[in-house]
Every structure is written in structure tokens, then in C-alpha cells.
Amino acid sequence: MGLFGLPASAQPLYPTPDPDPFYAAPSDLAARQPGDVVRLRRVGTGPYVGSEGWQVAFRSTNSTGNPVMGVTTVLRPMGVPNPPLVSYQALINSLGTKCQPSRSLLNGGMPEEDMVAGAMVPIARGWAVSMPDYLGPTSAYGAAKLSGMMTLDSIKAVRKAADLGLATSPVAIAGYSGGAMATVWAAALQPTYAPDLRLTAAVAGGIPADLEEMATALGFEPHPGFGLAFAAAMGLEREYPDRLPVSDQLNENGLWFRELTHDACRKFLLFHGAFRSAEQMAASKNLMNSPEAHAVLRENSLRYFEGVPAVPTYFWQARFDELTHFGPVAELADRYCKAGTPLQFRPYDTTEHMTAAVTGFGGAWNYLEARFRGEPAPTSC
């Protein structure tokens, strides 16, 4: 028998740990509070001209309430006193520790969308940027609630790190797609998980609001995005090993693909997973019939989380996006409005997921700029 009494084949396959001791959790981590700084170091900023960089290791919490260590990377514009701070949740969509922003931001592995929209544009506007490794130390892709807690604790740590000079800066959170999921979870969790943390605004687009619906829609047929769906299943198994033994449902081909991808980044997953299917990987269809599997997916779906953001919020979404469906986001926006969230919702009549990212970011940054200036938040409620 393996972990938690499961058969050995059901044990999650975790990523190769980063060998850098900076990422190692201290023995007294549990004695620290969420958002406490564990360690700090200066880093080079590579292509991000006009900025200086740090990495902050901090204490956070996983989905079962246990302490875990996180890392965020901060770029601060030179010569700007007390700049606003944007926590930008990048498109991680990966299973390897090498793919997290603390590595990819500075080694050329980060998607161009994040390098430009998430780092260069805010720095050019005079803002500091923090990019957390919000998937946690096991790269638990798909663990959305975890990503929200990691995001909030990363902001608390950045404000506590005296060397950064950001203790009194106004703070906003932003992200697209998987980064939007982390962003909106952070906004919705903030009133209960981090009530002492004041946020100025949240902007998010291409939001995966219902993981259960996305998994059901994928089904067992070949799909161009299967690599990311498979990675999300593996990531959720890492976060919920006693509730979601996905590996126990894999056949020989599935176990081979799990081994091939357990340290993989986004491009590798997309390329090698394109038009594969759950039918090819699964020994049976029992997992998707499991009430516990559906419960885990719902627990990580914003559509079913009762908490709502208390800060000015901006959503944008493609009406015909086949990856992150419009309906659940529209429903979420309506519920937030009825609960009193000052929300502006901007639909776009486009179909392709990443096209909507490019289309919508300009308006999102302008929305943040206005909030940083103290202007009243517009609403479409």
C-alpha cells in the first residue's frame, strides 16, 4: 500500500524538487503565520529594463489547511517612490517547478503574453510587479483555492519585506486564464482568509469559473487542449492525494504519459497532449463517475464558492471562448453584482482564448490606473 493507504499505483507523481536551497521550507514553518517572510534575496532583472528585482519566500497554506512555503518574484521600477503594487498571476499551466514564475520570469521560459502584459507594461507605467508561484511547492496545477491563498500570502509577504519599500503601496491583483482563476479566487477569499489585507482592485479575463463543467465538456474524445486537462488532473491529485487518486485510474499508456509530463511546462504539455484523449489514458471511466471527484472540482470552481470580492473588480471574457466558457462567468458576474461587489463586466465578441487576452488587457490596465488615482469604480451591475 502507498500514501494514505492507497495502492502504490495511486500515489501522485510529484515534480522534481528545485535543488536551490532558497526553495526549501524551514523546520519551523508551521510556527509562522500565513504571509510571514521566510527569506529574501536580490535577483537580476534580465530584459526588464529600468527595474530591480527580489525574490521573497513566505509561509502559506494548502487546500487541507497545512503550512506550505511559497515564493514570489518582485520587480520594482527604479526611481519611483512608493509605487503601486500589482500582483500578477501568470499563465503557469504547468507541472514542473522549473515552470513557475520565479524561474521562468528570468530564464526566458515565461510566455510572451506574461513578459509583456504582466511585467513590462506595469513597469512602464511606474508600478511594481509581484509574480507568485501560486501553484505551490508541488506545482498543483488546477488547485484553484490553493492559488488564491498563495496569491494573498505573497502580497502580505511583499509588504512585510522592508527592503522592498512597498509596505504602504496600494495593491491590485490581475491575471488571465489560469492566472485569472488565481486572481478571482484571491479576491473572493480575501474577506475571510486575509481580512487584514487591503486591496485596491482586481482585474481578470478568460476566467475558468467551473472546472466541473470544463472536465465534463472535455469528455473522452480527442481534444487539442488535452495536455492541459491531463496536467490539471495530475495537479489536483497532488493537492488531494487521499480524495482524487487519478493515477489509480490510468492504464499503461496513461502512466507513461504521466511520467513524460510530470516536470513539463505549458508548451510541452500542449504539443505532446494535442488530440490525445482520456479514452487512450484511462483504464476505466469510473473517476468521472466518482462523487468525490466532482466534489473536488466544485470546491475549486468559483461558480460554487459562496465568497465574493469586496473590492472594485473588472472582468473581461470572450463570448464564444471554447476553453473558458462564457456562461459560468456571466453567472458569476451576476451573483457578485447582486452581493454588492462593484463590478464592471466587459464581454468581447471573439472566439479564440488568447486573442481575448490581447484585446482586453489595455482596458484592464486603464481600469487599475483609475483605481490607483482614487477615481470611483464604474459598474455594469
Image (cartoon, grey):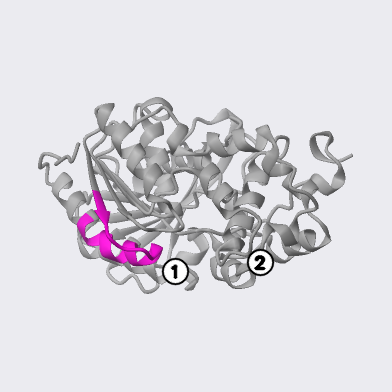
Give the vertical position of 380 relative to 106 (above or below): above
Q: Which residue is mark 1?
A: 111
Instruction: Please tell me which residue is depicted at 53% across the width and 58% down the height of the picture.
Output: 93
361 magenta-colored: yes
Instruction: Please tell me which residue is depicted at 57% across the width and 59% down the height of the picture.
Output: 228
Q: Quadrant of the N terminus?
A: top right
Q: Which residue is mark 2?
A: 276
Q: 270 or 43: which is nearer to us?
A: 270
Left or right of residue 19: residue 306? left
- Numbered disc 1: secondary structure: loop
Q: Amino acid at mark 2?
A: Arg
Counting from the top left corner in percent of width and height, residue 311 is at: 26, 35
Q: 144 or 295: which is nearer to us?
A: 295
Counting from the top left corner in percent of width and height, residue 17 is at: 67, 56
Counting from the top left corner in percent of width and height, residue 275 is at: 62, 69
The answer for how far apart the CA atoms under marks 2 and 1 are is: 23 Å
Instruction: Please tell me which residue is depicted at 26% across the width and 28% down the height of the picture.
Output: 338
Left or right of residue 215: residue 286? right
Counting from the top left corner in percent of width and height, residue 374 is at: 12, 41
Q: Quadrant of the rendered structure where residue 258 is? A: bottom right
Query: What secondary structure characterizes most of the magenta part?
Result: helix
